[in-house]
Amino acid sequence: MVFARGSNTVPADLPGAIAELRKQRKAIILAHYYQDNSIQDIADFIGDSLELSRKAAATDAEVIVFCGVHFMAETAKILSPDKTVLIPDLEAGCSLADACPADGFASFRAQHPDHFVVSYINCSAAVKAQSDLICTSSNAVSLVQQLPADRPILFAPDQNLGRWVQQQSGRELTLWPGSCIVHETFSEEALLRLKLAHPEAEVLAHPECQEHLLDQADFIGSTSALLRRAASSEASSFLVLTEPGILHQMRLQVPGKAFYEVPGADGCSCNACPYMRLNTLEKVWSCLETLSPAIELEEGLRQRALAPIERMLAMST
Ligand code: 13P
Ligand code: SF4
């Protein structure tokens, strides 16, 4: 099957058309666990933020289709400037990244000039460029523990993750007051109801959840860590406090166990990330066909943002 570049006709067999275009473009399709099941099913690699960054840095593909949100695709471009990095929907942002504008962050840093600046990867390149070290939810505790004990630390932009890192590492952190609209939506009442209905179930939570929900969790970790825990745990059922996209891989990779998503307040489906879910199979096909939208970055900014990411990769096991 051959496509004219710029053709508007959407093929009936989207997975087949994407497979063909992927070969033509020498492309790799990377997907986060929060992507729609249909995208996870055609991806070459699915991972958490850290694993996706590593994959983007190591791939020899000429084109990276990043099925995730903007800061993730931007990180791929920072690490692989010579590759074409595509994102199916350029509007796929992140409430955490939006909660930390670069100019406000510069003022915050100026108020704490002696602090070492650790930023969660969920932030813009302009915030990364002002940071000493980037972390993800899977390495934040270990990275903070490696910092000199006498150095005060600023942590941005997720205060829930920051509070959890503080507890786990024993280090005091000065927190930027940001949070994720998805992880703030989980209802404690709904969780307690599910716990009553499934008293044997283990509660798995992402550290972006609020403290009162993390207090109810049996295991806390990044999306990949939650998936590994579901496989290794002796429990046979799980209540999952993170974006429900992860349940697709849990059910595929850990068959025979039961997984229940925790809803938002009033049973709303606001536990689904509205940014992640902007990407669709059709947009994956379209971006491969037109090679757009592509991530572009000014070279000076890219280099400033690269240094703290490289430091993270060097310090992570
Ligand atoms: P992970 O580090 O688990 O991939 O989480 C990224 C994220 O955006 C969670 O909301
Ligand atoms: Fe950002 Fe929250 Fe969506 Fe993760 S789930 S991409 S932190 S808005």
Image: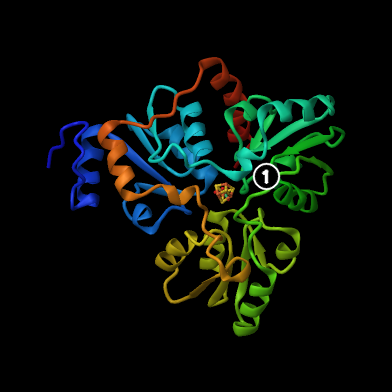
Residue in the picture at 71% in, 47% down? 141
Q: Identify the image quadrant of residue 238.
A: bottom right
Q: Position of residue 275 (x, y in %)?
A: 50, 47
Relative to 41, residue 153 above or below: above
Residue in the picture at 66% in, 55% down? 207
Does residue 164 appear to the left or right of 316 in the view shown?
right
**Which colour style is shown?**
rainbow
Disc 1 element: helix
What's the residue type where badge 1 is placed? Answer: Ala
Look at the image and tell me in which quarter the C terminus lies: top right
Outermost residue on the right side: it is 150
**Residue indicated by mark 1:** 140
Does residue 163 appear to the left or right of 131 in the view shown?
right
Outermost residue on the left side: it is 1
Relative to 245, residue 75 above or below: above
Q: Position of residue 302 (x, y in %)?
A: 54, 21
Look at the image and tell me in which quarter the N terminus lies: top left
Does residue 263 appear to the left or right of 155 in the view shown?
left
Q: Identify the image quadrant of residue 199.
A: bottom right
Residue in the picture at 66% in, 40% down? 99
Query: Neighbour class for label 1 at 10 Å: few (<14), some, many (≥20)?
Result: many
Relative to 127, residue 141 above or below: below
